Image (tube, helix red, strand yellow):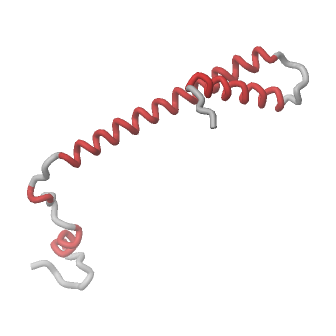
Amino acid sequence: MTIMTDEERRRQMIAEAAYFRAERRGFSGGDPVPDWIEAEAEIDARLRRESERRALLERLEEGLGSRKREPRRNGGRGTAATPKRRRANSGLAGDGAKPE
């Protein structure tokens, strides 16, 4: 098994994209240089988006990790009533009972 560097992987992706561009036009006419340049722009944009998504995911995971470590207030309970309690207090308990 061969491990590719990021640059080797990028070059392989560009080569494949350029090949598929030529294939779509039936390998007739055209110039391989513009195929390569367009494929390079396409792949670089894709890799940039992938990198940005990965960075965002890492930031989100770090944020969630830091929230888990923060001590909870109120014994881990929020200040709002539970949905069941809110329904009972609003007269919408479902059993026809009115709140007192």
Could you tell me which residue is drawn at 77 percent across and 14 percent down?
Answer: 33
User: Which image quadrant is residue 98 in?
Assistant: bottom left
* As drawn, 76 above or below 46: below
Q: Quadrant of the C terminus?
A: bottom left
Residue name at image x 10 percent, y 53 percent: 73
| Percent of width and height locating residue 24 | 82, 32
User: Measured from the top left, where is residue 76 in percent x and y?
Assistant: 14, 58
Residue 29, position in %: x, y?
89, 20
- In the rendered image of this protein, does residue 41 appear above or below residue 24? above
Give the total of numbered labels: 0
Q: Residue at x 75, y 25 (%)?
A: 18
Task: Say left or right for 29 vs 67.
Answer: right
Indicate left or right for 55 with 12 as reference.
Answer: left
Seen at 40% across and 35% down, the residue is 56
Depth check: 83 or 96 in front? 83
The answer to which image quadrant residue 20 occupies is top right
- Front-most of 41 and 93? 41
Residue 5 is drawn in which quadrant?
Answer: top right
Q: Is residue 16 left or right of residue 7?
A: right
Rendered-image quadrant of the N terminus = top right
Q: Judge from the rendering whether residue 58 lies leftward or rightward of residue 19; answer left or right.
A: left
Q: How far from the left and from the top, in percent, is residue 17?
A: 72, 29
Q: Among all residues in the image, which is located at the extreme right? A: 28
